[in-house]
Image: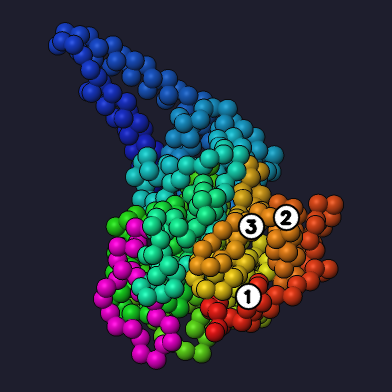
């Protein structure tokens, strides 16, 4: 018996067994009623099984049409066969199966049709099928489920550098507030963070009380292990660990960080106990779409304080030689609807992205990423597009330093048609607090700055970023154009004109 037949028999047996469980657990008031109910239910099950078998026979030609015409890309590179189609028919009905057959019979290969017909992409359908049957259970690892506030869109938000390290300015300020972390962020900003369908933050330190600070490194950041619970105050779903501070106290402290995040059920990417874990993606299933996140660091360029993960030792995924990262992106692209790469890269203190960032972004986009979000320079850098892929080069200091700096909650929105849109929620870090920018004159100055440090983009009144080189580029809605905008803000000074160092702290 071949593999397809085995799976088909397994699916049928599993389906029948699942229905029979309802008999066993039926609540009855006495033994006679239970016996009568068993007999009636058995008759119903027999009828349903017979009906289902006849239905499958009737649909056999439809199944052959789908399987005979489907391309690998259209079925998401999954091992779609009769067993899967039987399951799909049981879940969604004959009309869905027939519509799929008609689509491919006419030469169609639009992968979006799975979503339009079922409300789930082929990747989400395959995930559900594997959950139901136990087939390819390894594909279920590293996938988290999230509910959306709006059935018509998915909202993913990203915050830049924040720091909870002991004896650091932000943490000292927080510890002096009566309401702790809530005293460091405006209520409006906290609400924006918490209402995101997926919130991603850059964890620029370790949670541990072990290890020794790396010798010769100017800045080393370690937070008390209890502070990991503060991530829940923000509503964090995922943290990125591929940065140049997650190894500040050696392997022990990094391993503690991984363990504590696991205990708090907060997903992480970009570092791990070994190379395999550091290279892993985390996928989120939301609104019938499957979105993969991957992270790597291009820092340090001239030093090597932060260890790269190996087959036997903990560390980060590095991207100075990007092949491992690019392979991770390629693999993720095969099994997900979207791939979002989060990079730690660039030059500290610079307001404009550099050539290394652009070249790496180009390679990541070619490998299959749908959006790229960056950090590390401690300044809000500009946005851009490569091959239509939106890039936020650096989100800046979200809550990290004493200087007054523009920052953002960068937002990716995926609409019902599958279109991805980058936008910026204007924020400011000032006086060791973070807040939304709402005053009209400040909003204008913020967007003028963002446009001025970007290339070939336009920004509308809602902070949505558009590719000005695209064939269907918007013109009427653009208020801020990167080719015409100007700014007096430079990397050596904050937005109030104060001199700051490369990480954004005021210089006396």
Quick one: SS at disc 2?
helix
Residue 370 coordinates in the image, percent (x, y): 61, 59
> Spatial distance from mark 1 to mark 3, Cα to Cα?
16 Å
The residue tagged 2 is 440
Residue 286's place in the image compared with 183, above or below, is above
The residue at the point 56 percent across, 67 percent down is 430
Determine the main secondary structure of the stretch shown in magenta: loop
Residue 144 coordinates in the image, percent (x, y): 42, 50
Question: Which stretch did the figure color magenta?
Answer: 207-231
Residue 485 coordinates in the image, percent (x, y): 80, 68
The residue tagged 3 is 437
The residue at the point 70 percent across, 63 percent down is 446
Q: Quadrant of the N terminus?
A: top left
The numbered dot on residue 494 is 1
The residue at the point 50 percent across, 58 percent down is 185
* Residue 66 visible in the picture: no
Residue 124's place in the image compared with 202, above or below, is above
Is 212 one of the magenta-colored residues? yes
Comes first in the chain, label 1 or label 2: 2
Residue 434 coordinates in the image, percent (x, y): 53, 61
Residue 48's place in the image compared with 220, above or below, is above
CA neighbours of label 2 inside 10 A, class few (<14), some (14 to 19), many (20+): few
Comes first in the chain, label 1 or label 3: 3
Quick one: SS at disc 1?
loop
């Amino acid at each position: 018996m071949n593999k397809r037949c085995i799976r088909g028999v397994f699916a049928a047996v599993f389906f029948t067994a699942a229905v029979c469980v309802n008999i066993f657990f039926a609540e009855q008031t006495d033994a006679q009623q239970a016996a009568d109910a068993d007999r009636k239910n058995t008759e119903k099950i027999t009828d349903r099984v017979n009906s289902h078998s006849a239905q499958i026979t009737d649909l056999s030609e439809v199944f052959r049409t789908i399987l005979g015409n489907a391309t690998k890309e259209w079925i998401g590179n999954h091992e779609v066969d009769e067993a899967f189609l039987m399951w799909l028919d049981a879940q969604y009905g004959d009309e869905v199966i027939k519509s799929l057959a008609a689509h491919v019979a006419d030469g169609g290969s639009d992968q979006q049709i799975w979503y339009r017909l079922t409300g789930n992409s082929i990747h989400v359908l395959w995930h559900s099928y594997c959950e139901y049957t136990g087939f390819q259970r390894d594909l279920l690892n590293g996938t988290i489920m999230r509910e959306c506030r709006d059935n018509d869109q998915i909202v993913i938000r990203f915050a830049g550098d924040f720091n909870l390290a002991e004896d650091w300015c932000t943490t000292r300020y927080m510890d002096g507030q009566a309401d702790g972390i809530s005293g460091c962020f405006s209520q409006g900003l906290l609400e924006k963070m918490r209402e995101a369908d997926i919130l991603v933050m850059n964890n620029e330190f370790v949670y541990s009380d072990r290890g020794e600070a790396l010798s010769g490194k100017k800045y080393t950041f370690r937070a008390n292990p209890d502070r990991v619970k503060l991530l829940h105050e923000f509503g964090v779903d995922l943290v990125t660990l591929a940065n140049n501070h997650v190894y500040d106290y050696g392997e022990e402290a990094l391993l503690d960080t991984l363990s504590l995040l696991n205990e708090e059920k907060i997903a992480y990417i970009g570092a791990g106990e070994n190379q395999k874990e550091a290279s892993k993606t985390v996928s989120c299933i939301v609104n019938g779409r499957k979105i993969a996140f991957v992270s790597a660091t291009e820092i340090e360029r001239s030093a090597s304080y932060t260890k790269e993960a190996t087959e036997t030792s903990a560390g980060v995924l590095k991207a100075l030689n990007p092949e491992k990262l690019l392979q991770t992106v390629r693999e993720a692209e095969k099994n997900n609807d979207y791939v979002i790469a989060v990079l730690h890269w660039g030059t500290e203190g610079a307001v404009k992205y550099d050539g290394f960032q652009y070249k790496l972004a180009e390679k990541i986009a070619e490998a299959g990423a749908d959006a790229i979000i960056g950090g590390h320079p401690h300044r809000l850098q500009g946005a851009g597009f490569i091959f239509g892929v939106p890039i936020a080069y650096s989100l800046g200091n979200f809550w990290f330093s004493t200087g007054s700096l523009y920052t953002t909650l960068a937002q990716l929105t995926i609409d019902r048609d599958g279109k991805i849109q980058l936008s910026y929620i204007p924020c400011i870090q000032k006086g060791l607090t973070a807040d939304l920018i709402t005053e009209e004159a400040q909003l204008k100055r913020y967007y003028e700055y963002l446009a001025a440090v970007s290339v070939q983009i336009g920004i509308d009144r809602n902070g949505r970023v558009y590719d000005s080189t695209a064939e269907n580029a918007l013109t009427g809605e653009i208020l801020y154009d990167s080719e015409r905008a100007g700014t007096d803000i430079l990397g050596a000074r904050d937005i109030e004109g104060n001199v700051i160092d490369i990480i954004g702290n005021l210089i006396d």
